Protein backbone atom coordinates (compact mmCIF):
# COMPACT_ATOMS: atom_id res chain seq x y z
CA UNK A 1 0.00 0.00 0.00
CA UNK A 2 2.80 2.43 0.86
CA UNK A 3 4.57 1.63 -2.41
CA UNK A 4 1.44 2.57 -4.34
CA UNK A 5 1.20 5.87 -2.47
CA UNK A 6 4.85 6.62 -3.21
CA UNK A 7 4.34 5.89 -6.91
CA UNK A 8 1.22 8.09 -7.03
CA UNK A 9 3.01 10.93 -5.21
CA UNK A 10 6.00 10.74 -7.55
CA UNK A 11 3.82 10.74 -10.66
CA UNK A 12 1.89 13.76 -9.36
CA UNK A 13 5.14 15.52 -8.62
CA UNK A 14 6.45 14.75 -12.11
CA UNK A 15 3.26 16.05 -13.74
CA UNK A 16 3.33 19.25 -11.68
CA UNK A 17 7.00 19.75 -12.50
CA UNK A 18 6.35 19.25 -16.22
CA UNK A 19 3.39 21.67 -16.19
CA UNK A 20 5.48 24.34 -14.49
CA UNK A 21 8.31 23.90 -16.99
CA UNK A 22 5.84 24.13 -19.88
CA UNK A 23 4.13 27.15 -18.33
CA UNK A 24 7.44 28.90 -17.83
CA UNK A 25 8.49 28.20 -21.41
CA UNK A 26 5.19 29.41 -22.84
CA UNK A 27 4.94 32.41 -20.51
CA UNK A 28 8.46 33.58 -21.18
CA UNK A 29 7.90 33.89 -24.94
CA UNK A 30 5.89 37.07 -24.42
CA UNK A 31 7.92 38.43 -21.51
CA UNK A 32 10.48 41.14 -22.05
CA UNK A 33 14.15 40.44 -21.38
CA UNK A 34 14.01 42.85 -18.44
CA UNK A 35 11.22 40.80 -16.85
CA UNK A 36 13.13 37.54 -17.29
CA UNK A 37 16.26 39.14 -15.86
CA UNK A 38 14.25 40.36 -12.87
CA UNK A 39 12.85 36.88 -12.26
CA UNK A 40 16.33 35.34 -12.37
CA UNK A 41 17.64 38.07 -10.09
CA UNK A 42 14.88 37.29 -7.58
CA UNK A 43 15.59 33.56 -7.70
CA UNK A 44 19.32 34.18 -7.24
CA UNK A 45 18.76 36.63 -4.38
CA UNK A 46 16.47 34.17 -2.57
CA UNK A 47 19.04 31.38 -2.99
CA UNK A 48 21.87 33.53 -1.64
CA UNK A 49 19.74 34.78 1.26
CA UNK A 50 18.81 31.29 2.44
CA UNK A 51 22.33 30.00 1.81
CA UNK A 52 23.78 32.76 3.99
CA UNK A 53 21.30 31.96 6.76
CA UNK A 54 22.46 28.34 6.67
CA UNK A 55 26.10 29.37 6.60
CA UNK A 56 25.72 31.68 9.60
CA UNK A 57 23.84 29.00 11.54
CA UNK A 58 26.62 26.52 10.79
CA UNK A 59 29.30 28.97 11.95
CA UNK A 60 27.42 29.66 15.18
CA UNK A 61 27.04 25.96 15.89
CA UNK A 62 30.70 25.16 15.28
CA UNK A 63 32.16 28.10 17.21
CA UNK A 64 32.43 27.28 20.89
CA UNK A 65 34.71 29.48 22.96
CA UNK A 66 34.85 29.11 26.71
CA UNK A 67 35.11 32.62 28.13
CA UNK A 68 36.60 31.36 31.40
CA UNK A 69 39.64 30.13 29.49
CA UNK A 70 40.13 33.61 28.00
CA UNK A 71 39.89 35.59 31.25
CA UNK A 72 43.56 35.11 32.17
CA UNK A 73 44.77 36.79 28.99
CA UNK A 74 46.36 40.25 29.39
CA UNK A 75 44.28 41.71 26.54
CA UNK A 76 40.66 42.77 26.26
CA UNK A 77 38.12 40.21 25.11
CA UNK A 78 37.15 42.45 22.17
CA UNK A 79 40.67 42.13 20.81
CA UNK A 80 40.53 38.34 21.17
CA UNK A 81 37.32 38.06 19.21
CA UNK A 82 38.63 40.48 16.58
CA UNK A 83 41.71 38.31 16.07
CA UNK A 84 39.59 35.15 15.81
CA UNK A 85 37.33 36.80 13.25
CA UNK A 86 40.20 38.14 11.18
CA UNK A 87 41.92 34.74 11.25
CA UNK A 88 38.73 33.07 10.00
CA UNK A 89 38.32 35.61 7.19
CA UNK A 90 41.91 35.17 6.04
CA UNK A 91 41.65 31.37 5.80
Image (tube, grey):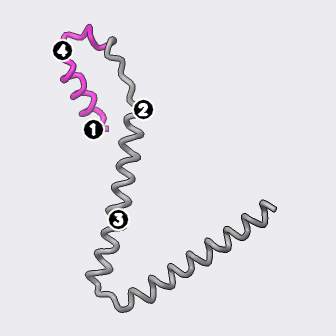
Q: Is residue 90 above or below residue 1?
A: above
Q: Which residue is identified by label 4? A: 75
Residue 15 in the image: state x and y as whole percent: 61, 78
Q: Residues within 10 Å of mark 2 (few under 14, many from 20)?
A: few
Mark 3 and mark 1: Cα distance apart in space = 26 Å
Quarter residue 87 falls in = top left
- If the image is split into quadrants, where does the N terminus sit? bottom right
* SS class, disc 1: helix
Left or right, residue 66 beside residue 1: left
Magenta stretch: dominant secondary structure: helix
Q: Which residue is identified by label 2? A: 62
Residue 9 circle label: none
Q: Nearer the viewer, mark 2 or mark 4?
A: 2
Q: Is residue 75 above or below residue 7?
A: above
Residue occupying the far right of the picture = 1
Q: Residues within 10 Å of mark 3 (few under 14, many from 20)?
A: few
Q: Which residue is identified by label 3? A: 44
Q: Nearer the viewer, mark 1 or mark 2?
A: 2
Dot 3 or dot 1, earlier in sequence = 3
Mark 3 and mark 4: Cα distance apart in space = 43 Å
Residue 19 in the image: state x and y as whole percent: 54, 81
The stretch of residues the image draws in magenta is 69-91
Circles 3 and 4: CB atoms closer than 8 Å: no
* SS class, disc 3: helix
Mark 2 and mark 3: Cα distance apart in space = 27 Å
Dot 4 or dot 1, earlier in sequence = 4
Circles 2 and 4: CB atoms closer than 8 Å: no
Mark 1 and mark 2: Cα distance apart in space = 18 Å
Dot 2 or dot 4, earlier in sequence = 2
Q: Residues within 10 Å of mark 1 (few under 14, many from 20)?
A: few
Residue at image coords 36%, 22%: 65
Dot 2 or dot 3, earlier in sequence = 3
Amino acid sequence: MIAVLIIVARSRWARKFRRRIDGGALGSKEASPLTIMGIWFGITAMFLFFWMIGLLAEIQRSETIDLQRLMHLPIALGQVFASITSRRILH
